């Protein structure tokens, strides 16, 4: 691994930690506001990534580094603890807790998009060439813009990754399959009685693995269309 790849690895890891830490900290903060202090007591109500890494070292460090080495981008997981009795007693509060994680990813996505558009408007960034966007026969999530000056290349890559990674996290986590956040968010549109029954049903362990597989298949199906829309929002109708 040469110095350039090490630099890219560092940028990817910073973006990954920020995105996943914000997601879990948002879960923890809303749970605390709703009366469940489990995550607060575990130190999860923080944007410091260390407590989240300590809780999920494989998902927050090992898997991201391995996935980057194998595929050139990072995937992983983290979690904020909560009291299942609290969630069963207050299904709407639990639903808002679930929605908070994707909401944090949405905020990061919007901030990154705004900064990318500003950089394009002021000439610091430019649209990538096709061979830059699809280097090594694979879509480069860190190259949705390129820097027009060498000193901005790291910032261009970081903002590109933050934009695209948080779109992926937002889409994936809002799919209504257990154990993803979307399976709880949908209960906001149900009566409390139906929400309790639905939560009890999808909370069975046998559905978690199936839910992840189905959600991943759907994300693969949706991703290209979503990417094209986002790329056009940045650069205009180029595809």
Image (cartoon, rainbow, N blue to C red):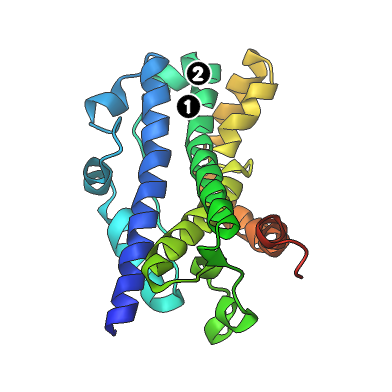
Local crowd size for mark 1, using a 10 Å CA cut-off: few (<14), some (14–19), many (≥20): many
Near-viewer residue (86 or 112): 112
* Residue 197 coordinates in the image, percent (x, y): 61, 23
* Residue 26 coordinates in the image, percent (x, y): 41, 32
Alpha carbons under labels 1 and 2: distance apart: 6 Å
Instruction: Look at the picture and state if 196 lies above or below 225.
Output: above
Q: Is 21 positioned to the left or the right of 180 in the image?
A: left
Quadrant for the C terminus in the image: bottom right
Q: Taking the image as drawn, is residue 191 in sight? A: yes
Near-viewer residue (20 or 173): 20
Tell me the tag on residue 34: none
Residue with the mark numbered 2: 93
Residue with the mark numbered 1: 97
Instruction: Look at the picture and state if 63 lies above or below 84.
Output: below
Q: Residue at x 36, y 20 (%)?
A: 32
Q: Secondary structure at mark 2?
A: helix
Q: Are marks 1 and 2 in contact (CB under 8 Å)?
A: yes
């Amino acid at each position: 691994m040469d110095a350039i790849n090490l630099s890219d690895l560092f940028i990817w890891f910073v973006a990954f930690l920020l995105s996943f830490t914000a997601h879990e900290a948002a879960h923890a903060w809303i749970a605390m506001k709703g009366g469940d202090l489990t995550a607060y007591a575990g130190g999860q109500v923080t944007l410091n990534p260390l407590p989240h890494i300590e809780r999920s070292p494989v998902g927050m460090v090992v898997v991201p580094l391995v996935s980057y080495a194998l595929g050139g981008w990072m995937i992983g997981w983290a979690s904020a603890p909560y009291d299942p009795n609290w969630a069963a007693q207050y299904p709407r509060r639990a639903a808002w807790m679930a929605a908070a994680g994707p909401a944090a990813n949405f905020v990061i996505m919007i901030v990154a998009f705004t900064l990318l558009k500003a950089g394009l408007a002021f000439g610091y960034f430019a649209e990538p060439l096709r061979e830059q966007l699809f280097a090594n026969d694979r879509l480069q999530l860190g190259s949705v813009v390129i820097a027009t000056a060498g000193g901005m290349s790291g910032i261009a890559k970081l903002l590109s990754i933050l934009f695209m990674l948080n779109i992926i996290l937002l889409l994936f986590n809002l799919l209504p399959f257990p154990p993803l956040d979307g399976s709880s968010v949908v209960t906001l549109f149900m009566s409390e009685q139906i929400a309790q029954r639905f939560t009890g049903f999808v909370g069975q362990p046998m559905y978690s693995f199936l839910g992840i597989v189905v959600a991943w298949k759907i994300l693969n199906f949706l991703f290209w269309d979503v990417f094209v829309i986002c790329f056009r929002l940045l650069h205009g109708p180029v595809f």
